[in-house]
Image (spheres, rainbow, N blue to C red):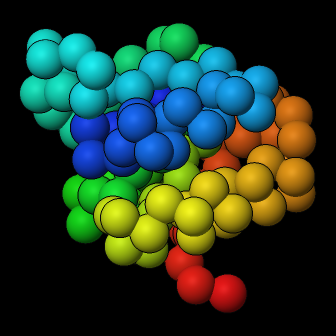
Amino acid sequence: MRVLLDAHVSSRHVGRRLARAGHDVLALDQDETLSRLPDEDVLALAAEQQRVAITHNVRHFAPLARSWAESRRSHQGLILVTLALTDYAAVLRRLEQAFAEHPGQSDWLDRVALLSRV
């Protein structure tokens, strides 16, 4: 899966493990310029690079996804994570489940998923 980790998703704890599992990971916290992108630009970058965006910033990205849907603007998928920033094991477990349920990159087209405690 091609994924983009928003700046608040740990590339060290989440990104590395996703990469080891075979995912193509772009982690914004690894680039000073990318880490400061406005939310709209983060989703646009993910769409442009055909990556599923993963973020803890539910407050801003949920309305952004709604706005994109209303304007018929397409994205490559958005995963909103409500688990604690540092609960890496739970985040990884829920991401694995989400990718197992929707294993194809095209399965994520315009899909918005919420990762929370099960």
Decide: is 89 above or below 20. Answer: below
In percent of width and height, residue 71 lies at 42, 40
Question: Foreground residue, 69 or 29?
Answer: 29
Horizontal placement of 41 versus 86: left or right?
left
Horizontal placement of 8 versus 1: left or right?
left
Horizontal placement of 107 versus 50: left or right?
right
In percent of width and height, residue 78 lies at 53, 47
Tell me, yes or no, if residue 67 can be seen here.
no
Q: Residue at x 15, y 32 (%)?
A: 38
Tell me, yes or no, if residue 11 can be seen here.
yes
- The C terminus, quarter of image: bottom right
Q: Residue at x 11, y 27 (%)?
A: 36
Horizontal placement of 102 versus 56: left or right?
right
In percent of width and height, residue 63 lies at 32, 60
- The N terminus, quarter of image: top right
Decide: is 20 above or below 112. Answer: above
Total of numbered circles in the picture?
0
Q: Quadrant of residue 44?
A: top left
Decide: is 12 above or below 19. Answer: below
Q: Residue at x 69, y 63 (%)?
A: 93
Question: Foreground residue, 10 or 34?
Answer: 10
Residue lying at the far bottom in this picture: please name it: 118
Q: Residue at x 23, y 15 (%)?
A: 31
Decide: is 62 above or below 47. Answer: below
In percent of width and height, residue 67 lies at 36, 50
